[in-house]
Amino acid sequence: MKFSLRIKLSVSYLLVAIISVALVMALTNMFLDSHFRKYANWNQEQRNRDVVTSVSQQYLGDGKWNTDMIEAIGTSALENGLIIKVKDISGKVIWDATAHNNGMCQRIIEHMAHNVSSRYPDVGGAYREIPYEVKYNEENVGLVEVGSYGPYYLNDNDLAFINTLNKILIGVGVFSVILSLVLGSIMARRLSLPIARVISSAQSISRGYFSDRISEESTTEEICQLTSTINNLAQTLEKQEALRKKMGADVAHELRTPLATLQSHMEAMIDGIWEPDADRLKSCHEEIIRINKMVGDLEKLAKYESESLVLNKVRFDISELIRRIVCNFEPEFKNRGIEIAFEGEVEEIFADRDKMSQVIINLISNALKYTQEGGMVRISARGRGGAVEIRVKDNGQGIPEEDLPFVFERLYRADKSRNRLTGGAGIGLTIAKTIIEAHNGRIEVSSKINEGTEFLITLQKGI
């Protein structure tokens, strides 16, 4: 059986409150009861001695007692729940509460027994008489027997105090339970509502609606991180969905032109409008090559982005590799009237030489395509601690700021016209990024319109 977070939180608050109150009540009663029993015995002893002291003061000497005052003291003690019996040194009874009012004495004894049994039902109490000596000038002149119910004697005030304390504890317990339910419900609501909102947003994302954003704020750090993560996920998926749609449109655009050309040429030759001479067949062949090249690029991209990409790593000098590639590009740069220069010392890395060569070629090719006549392309390779930084910088037309986050996406080109003269299908940079990341490196781009573009590759030198 599954329960909601709100119910679990409310129940947990309630259980904590009940357990806490129960522990407080148990510990309070345990410690208080021990001290209270000692207090009750001490208080009873003090009352007994006060009565004995009062009786001792009624001895007149020579075996004579002030019987009237002893009767008054005994009556007063009886009214306060004490049953006393006064004897002289010979054992003769001077005053006996049971003889004075036996019925009242029986009621007092029953009342004592009821008080003790109501608090301690298993104590096994019994009525007993405690003897106290009466002294006059340091000599024993008599005996006072004080009757009480033991082992603990509780008068009405003592019992009322204990009952009142328990009622207060019970009241505090009930209040704590109610308060815990209220606070638990409030806290559960504050925690569960943002989570429910996250669930709703996640469900929308699963159905393909990426525009939903969580705007509710929370003071809980983990909830804020969760909502922020979901919002970032939705934003990323929304961008990816837009790129996916754009990629589909771009692929269709790239294929439509050569296919349309082939179709029109073939129809014209079939209908007899054109003669199938060498020039027209060559034109059709060029379009087929273009289509085949795009399919090959897509296959190559799929291969590089697969988890089965194998890197044949060797130790080599990246500066020597770049210098050789630059040498191969020099004729093309010279024909376009663009200067190219490389700066770098020996920097050995442990990487796949062929794939790193492809990355450098892609970056230099891009720089060549987007740099105007009279421009300059600078390439450098410098060590930074345990890493190597490779920079390819041109002073060409630059990339618009809004296009910078997407230059490494599949089939993305900042040139919306997709002019054949300004680039390919927009796969080269995607492949370059895939290769660099496979080497646990990173590639970054910075650019300004009409000032140029710079690509920065950071690679660890490796073992």
Image (cartoon, rainbow, N blue to C red):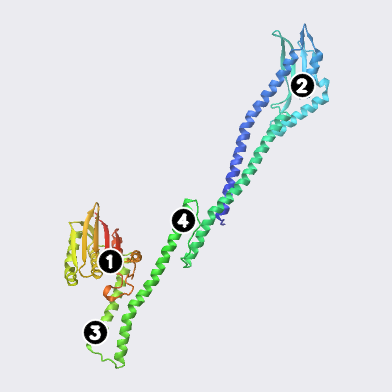
Residue 3 placed where, x, y %?
57, 56
Query: What element does badge 1 sit on?
Result: loop
Name the residue at 29% across, 90% down.
269
Name the mark on residue 111. Answer: none
Q: Nearer the viewer, residue 26 or 443?
A: 443
Quadrant of the rendering where the C terminus is positioned: bottom left
Residue carrying label 2: 77
Q: Residues within 10 Å of mark 4 (few under 14, many from 20)?
A: some
The amino acid sitting under disc 2 is: Ala
The amino acid sitting under disc 3 is: Lys
Query: What element does badge 3 sit on?
Result: helix
- Between marks 3 and 1, how big is the CA–CA gap? 38 Å
Residue carrying label 4: 226
Residue carrying label 3: 282
Residue carrying label 1: 450
Picture quadrant where residue 377 is located: bottom left
User: Disc 3, disc 2: CB below 8 Å?
Assistant: no
Residue 149 vs 169, above or below: the answer is: above
Q: Residues within 10 Å of mark 1 (few under 14, many from 20)?
A: few
Does residue 124 appear in the picture of this structure? no
Residue 207 placed where, x, y %?
48, 67
- Between marks 3 and 4, how big is the CA–CA gap? 60 Å
Query: What element does badge 2 sit on?
Result: helix
Q: Nearer the viewer, residue 84 or 347?
A: 347
